[in-house]
Image: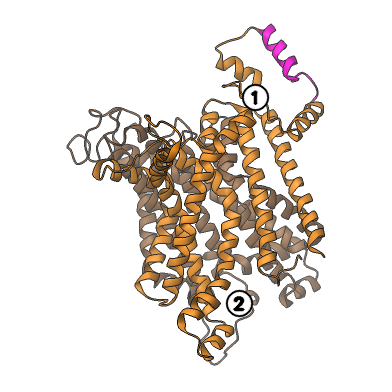
Chain colours: A brown, B orange
Amino acid sequence: MNKLATMPSVSAAPDAPAKPALRVEHPGMEAMRMFLRNPAAIAGMAMLLAMLAVAIAGPWFHPADPFEIKAAPLTPPFSEEAWLGTDYLGRDVLTTLIYGGRATLLVGAVAALLSVLIGITLGAFAGYYGGKVDAALMKLTEFFQVLPALLFAMVVVTLFSPTLVTVTLAIGIVSWTGTARLTRAEFMKYRGLEFVRAERAIGARDARIIWKVILPNALPPLVVSATLAIGAAVLFEAGLSFLGLGDPNQMSWGLMIGSSRQYVLSCWWAVAFPGAAIFITVLAVSLIGDGLNDALNPKLRER
Amino acid sequence: MGTLRYAASRLLQALGLVLAVVVLNFVLVHAAPGDPVETIAGASGGMSPELMTQLRAQYGLDRSLPVQLGVYLGKVAQGDLGYSYFFNLPVTSMIAERVPATLLLVLSSVLLAFFAGTALGVLSSRRPNGWLSQFITVLSLVGFAAPVFWLGIMLVILLASVFPILPVAGMRSIDSAGGGLKDVLDVAHHLVLPTLTLSLVYLAQYSRLARSSMLDVLGSDFIRTARAKGLADRVVLYKHALRNALLPVVTVLGLQFGNVLAGAILVETVFNWPGLGRLAFESVLRRDYPTILGVLLFSSIVVVVMNQLTDLCYRFIDPRIKAS
């Protein structure tokens, strides 16, 4: 949002017709206002903030070891020893929920950031330079689109021992292609427009045109896609750790589901709650993404 | 450019992509710490250094990397993906054995999702703000946000303990005699839950896509013309609009189909479905590199082939598309 608020005035929606008679509102402010008026987006924001608060502050209020055995195995939820019950080993589901969220959210956020950085950089170069650079970078993108993402990440994580870092890298490396294509399309759209040509005419370097002139204009759809990338990365992390390929020393929601899978008929709660946590997190992120999409791309709003 | 020349150039690109995957496979294995012999030694619980040297020579691991790459490429070109460390079987035959189960699961899920999704999309497009449209919006949010393996397990809980009518694991009953109509029914019975789970995700996407595509088409001029000349609502909807609205859905279906194969890993794991995804999962757990790399290569080839077929079909369905 801050980035949008400080956009140079040249870049303020180049194709929007100017109506000098009306009071002109800054596009960033208008988007913010529209976002805040969207109840679904606000609900998503609230859910995500709640999840983050629990993950960050939870261990402070509730210091415990998520791997520790706390009560009798298979204690049902809403009992006194364990509010959300215990799993087949007697580990407290509430504790694992609080600590498991840390790994899942951290990996999801960093992996999404990584994939967006790779995608924007490669997409920007491809779209801006065109020609051979574009052809080569698009070949690379096509190559990564052909690789089955989950399978490839599984291979990478297995070959290079599963830790938080390798899992994050693996997710980031396999999920940047969509962002790259979107960025490329946006850059190709702006590359030939007058305000970019004017910038070039006064002798601006390529780096300045790419990062300071075109990128701020291309940002709205990229912000939306980056938001959705967080949701996808959280799901990806959950899938990997469900398969037992996450960091074995880090409790995570997917790991809880994966390890309790065999015992699900005697303790549904050890699977239902962590799954619901993943669901709520990803739902929150995609509601925010939809809200941002409506606010930032008002032309598409009729859908 | 003629269609034939176009097809040839696409084929060359496809071969290039497959070659790149093979090289990547090779690079990955050699970049990883430790070598296959150490893995085998670890799996068999210790090995003398002499035997390890001998094994390295036997597998050609003592030769230079470019030579090894050349040997590997030659073998792959002949359809030889090596032997599984664990089962000591050729990887190709292990893959071949697992393909039918995965194909069955993927085909039934994608087809179910396609038909149900299109139907939902078409019905909801008649009332863009009706309850069905809102249902699709909710469905697509849930389909994206709910982890597929969790949905599967929740279905298992529901259908195993609340309404125990469906089998929750495997592909056949233990007492299945094999062969005949009874076997077919048995497999179909086991197929219901995995198919339902896997298709939910795609249903969410297809219904949303079909709906917006229908709305797009219904707003175009030729639909207004069709209505203006007095055609019945049904004819306009199904003959004029649906045919055109299906194009993007078919494209997404074709492009996704290859990836569904790998997407089936999670569902196959939940339901113990004896397919390719479970083979990948099992070989990852056993660090059976030849098998996992074989599955990766095979799945990539499927994706490449499906992409090319979709592309060709698309040109065939919509003659306006010309190669850029």
Where does residue B295 sit, x and y in percent of width and height?
Answer: 61, 36
Q: CA distance from mark 2 to mark 1?
A: 59 Å
Q: Is residue A36 left or right of residue B239?
A: left
Q: Which residue lies under the disc numbered 1?
A: B83
- Compared to residue A297, the image places residue A284 above or below, namely above
- Compared to residue B295, the image places residue A221 above or below, namely below
Q: Nearer the viewer, residue B5 or A26?
A: B5
Callout 2, which amino acid? Ala
Residue positioned 56% across, 88% down in the render: B225
Q: Is residue A26 visible?
A: no
Magenta-span inclusion, residue B52: yes
| Residue stretch rendered in magenta on the structure | B49-64
Where does residue B115 sit, x and y in percent of width and height?
Answer: 47, 61
Callout 1, which amino acid? Tyr
Where does residue A238 sit, x and y in percent of width and height?
Answer: 45, 43
Q: Secondary structure at mark 2?
A: loop
Q: Which residue lies under the disc numbered 2?
A: A13
Q: Residue furthest front?
A: B180
Q: Residue furthest bottom?
A: A21
